[in-house]
Amino acid sequence: MKRKLIFLDIDGTLTPPGSNMPPASAREAIRRALHNGHKVFLCTGRNKGMLSPVLALEDFSGAVASAGGYVFMGDRVLFDCPMTDDQFHTAMRLLKDGGVFRTIETKDHTYSDENLGDFLSLMGGGNSELERWRKALAEQLRIQPLSAYDGAPVYKIVFMCNESAQLTPAEKALGEAFNFVVQDGRHHGCLNGEMINRKFDKGRGVRAVAEALGVGIEDTIGFGDSMNDLEMIETVGTSVCMENGSPLLKSKSSLVCPAVDQDGLSWAFERLGLIG
């Protein structure tokens, strides 16, 4: 079989949301795929700091991190695009004025409004992104209070609020430069998503890796579950959405596989001939 580049989202795809540990079946599938000569990359909204515990588990070749804002392969950085200071300060001010709960991500660290945990405690079960932040806070997954922010360049702002109108001022001011990616569907009154620079996305991150390795896009495979995976799903040669994922993403994918906690990755790797 022709060697493939495999791109894996983390939360809700490779691992249960908010966790750093993939199911044993997924780890075994990755090892077998690597043994067969395929290359496997993480492709995630997480920054480098938050993905590092997962990256260390297997012989991954690199990652499309921060939803495409920071792309690396081994020690080689292929793309690095934080927001400007002016963009950051404008976004933070307008989101705060709108009563929006904010989580900011630098390359290595993540900082959250101190009262975000209280907000999430009022919410019930939700999509993978909501669960990621709830569990990340509960398990202290490298998330620090916003007051500890050290001024490092910021790649992404995650937001949570009750109504879309709370985002309107920030969208009006920054919508030309940033895509406000809102997860499809509301969960117990919570609207959540993230501000992603229009200069990058996961799909362009995939292309950067493929071009660096001289691999045609038709030989790329992407796995995801939420709307921040959309550009990856639309870019790769073969796209796979988890059964626990977004209905819209499923409709755009080549294949839907079982959920992350039902050996979905192993099933899909087998189905696609990656580990046969």
Image (spheres, rainbow, N blue to C red):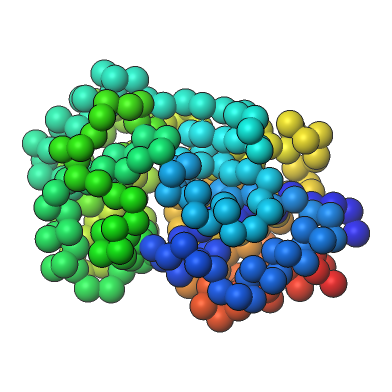
Q: Does any portion of residue 203 appear in the rendered image?
A: no
Q: Residue furthest right?
A: 1
How far across and down, in percent of the image, does residue 9 sit?
Answer: 54, 55
Q: Residue at x 17, y 54 (%)?
A: 116
Question: Which image quadrant is residue 212 in?
Answer: top right
Location of residue 194 by image quarter: top left
Residue at the spot x=80%, y=40% of the render?
Answer: 216
> 92 or 145: nearer the eye?
145
Q: Can residue 118 be seen in this view?
A: yes
Quarter holding residue 189: bottom left
Q: In this view, does 199 lie to the left or right of 190?
A: right
Q: How many labels does the image show?
A: 0
Examine the rendered structure and indicate whether residue 230 appears above or below residue 150. Answer: below
| Residue 37 at x, y percent in the picture | 84, 55
Question: Residue 91 in the image: x percent, y percent?
Answer: 23, 30
Furthest residue toward bottom:
262
Q: Which residue is drawn at 56% across and 48% down?
A: 43
Q: Which residue is drawn at 57% across and 53% down?
A: 56
Q: Quadrant of the C terminus?
A: bottom right
* Image quadrant in which the N terminus is located: bottom right
| Residue 197 position within the rendered picture, expressed as x and y whole percent measured from the top left | 41, 31
Residue 198 lies, with reference to residue 158, above or below; the image says above
User: Is 73 located above or below residue 60 in the figure?
Assistant: above
